[in-house]
Image (spheres, rainbow, N blue to C red):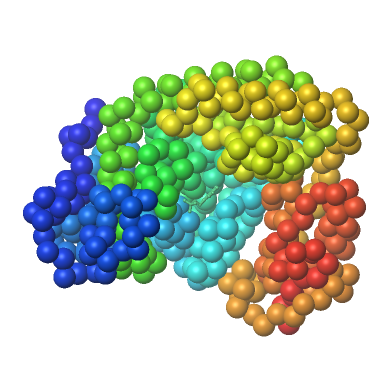
Amino acid sequence: MYKLDQNETPLFDALKEYVDRETIPFHVPGHKKGEGMDEEFRSFIGENPFKIDVTVFKLVDSLHHPTGPIKKAQQLAADAYGADATFFSIHGTSGAIQAMIMSVVSAGDKIIIPRNVHKSVTAGVILSGATPVYMQPELDKRVGIAHGVTPETVEKTLKANPDAKAVLIINPTYYGVATDIKRIADIVHSYDIPLIVDEAHGPHLGFNAKLPMSGMEAGADICAQSTHKIIGALTQCSLLQVRSKRVDVHRVQQILNLLQTTSPSYILMASLDCARRQIALHGRELLDKAISLANYAREEINKIPGFYCFGEEILGEPGVYALDPTKITITCRDLGITGYDLDMILSNKYHIQMEMSDLYNVLAVGSFGDTKENIDALLKALKEISQDFYGKGNKKADFIDIPNIPSQVKIPREAFNSEKVCVSLKESIGKISGEFLMAYPPGIPILCPGETITNEIIDYVQRLKETGLYVQGTEDPEVNYIKVVK
Ligand SMILES: Cc1ncc(COP(=O)(O)O)c(C=O)c1O
């Protein structure tokens, strides 16, 4: 099914050849194969990483102008993912998302995005100077999180904004919830504009039939995936995939060259090369194992009083078309403790570190690295925590409906670059926000830079605070003051 030999790892091989040649280094980095490195650090890390920590030269190729092993490694990745072209990002999916946005929209262009985007999307919008048009994702009040945007929402937003130049969606969400991406791709393409997919949490999707459809399979034009999050690349490593007549791959390369360092880490890039080999050759079996362990965890957690772990029963709810079972969202609302409390107890008392927490939930990320012993340790800890808190009369925090999206007076770039003053929340009504305001749950901005601050928003913030819910985004950690455009 692959056109190329996925056993090959051209970049990793070139680096090993450099090591085998016992080359004398008169190039950066200055530690020179670890010789000049701090002793404690070197002995902790071991020798090999320093030997392949090199810089740009012919044998190992250049990320900005690839003609040798990096070019070949990227072609292998494109072959594995069914893309026309793949680019390595060593600035994570954050860097890849900024590049995707800047590749398809420019100053003044409209881009349609969900309201609950990662901050790298906002960074891309600011850098490109585009005008964002927001779509509200579907809310699940039981678990207090936002799912995907529906095809209907995309269709409605495009009808109201037929001049939009691109649509971006998140698929799947951090919590592993996928929308009907195929239908969305068809709707977006009926306007002959590109669909951009933030697939930070989906680098594994195309490799096991039990997982939701990937962006590339659905016909998305360009997508970015955090290879480091789920499959075996090192932190910071992501892939940017293009399969489209609507996206100019040369422009994507140019933009990546603008944004990425001229000294990319070869250790990171080699890990991308090898992670691609691993997922291409062994992805299905490895994912089968990760999925079955995660399903075991989900079933067992649902037997523990006070915990809930959503699964297939929510399929078909708005914004929930498919689920990535490797994501384990543990809702602890019925224990009367917050997700943050649970996160802290697991970390401090049991030395179990979760991926993240919000008001109602903690998230465990399942992957190839899981073992039954580790899952059982988590289950044991959750059982003890349930005994400590369940039925002890602790009060549950309730979901408060979010206000309407306020009017946008300035585009985010203008607001970001404007002179700002700090005022109290009360005084800010009617002014243009220079900052974000986000409420947890569900982590959707209630205010973005450039939007008018309304009475409704300030009342809502007040209510959240009184209920003990979490508001953040302003420089003032107490959210008593906000920066507004002068
Ligand atoms: C939805 C989403 N998009 C993008 C990113 C950025 O990915 P990275 O950490 O690889 O830069 C994240 C990170 O958590 C994310 O959750």
Is 61 left, or right, of 242 in this rendering?
left
Residue at the image position 81 percent from the left and 49 percent from the top:
469
Front residue of 193/459: it is 459
Residue at the image position 75 percent from the left and 64 percent from the top:
477
Q: How many marks?
A: 0
Above or below, comparing residue 352 to residue 248 in the picture: above
Front residue of 374/159: it is 374
**Does residue 379 appear anywhere in the picture?**
yes
Is 271 left, or right, of 139 in this rendering?
left
**Does residue 343 appear anywhere in the picture?**
no
Residue furthest left as drawn: 21
Q: Position of residue 130 (x, y in %)?
A: 54, 66
Q: Position of residue 401 (x, y in %)?
A: 82, 45
Front residue of 208/137: it is 208
Q: Position of residue 122 (x, y in %)?
A: 57, 61
Q: Position of residue 99 (x, y in %)?
A: 42, 60
Q: Which quarter of the rendering shows the N terminus?
A: top left
Above or below, comparing residue 298 to residue 365 in the picture: above
Q: Quadrant of residue 154?
A: top right
Residue at the image position 64 percent from the left and 74 percent from the top:
415
Q: Quadrant of residue 263?
A: bottom left
Is 94 left, or right, of 430 in this rendering?
left
Residue at the image position 44 percent from the left and 63 percent from the top:
102
Q: Which quarter of the rendering shows the C terminus?
A: bottom right
Front residue of 312/374: it is 374
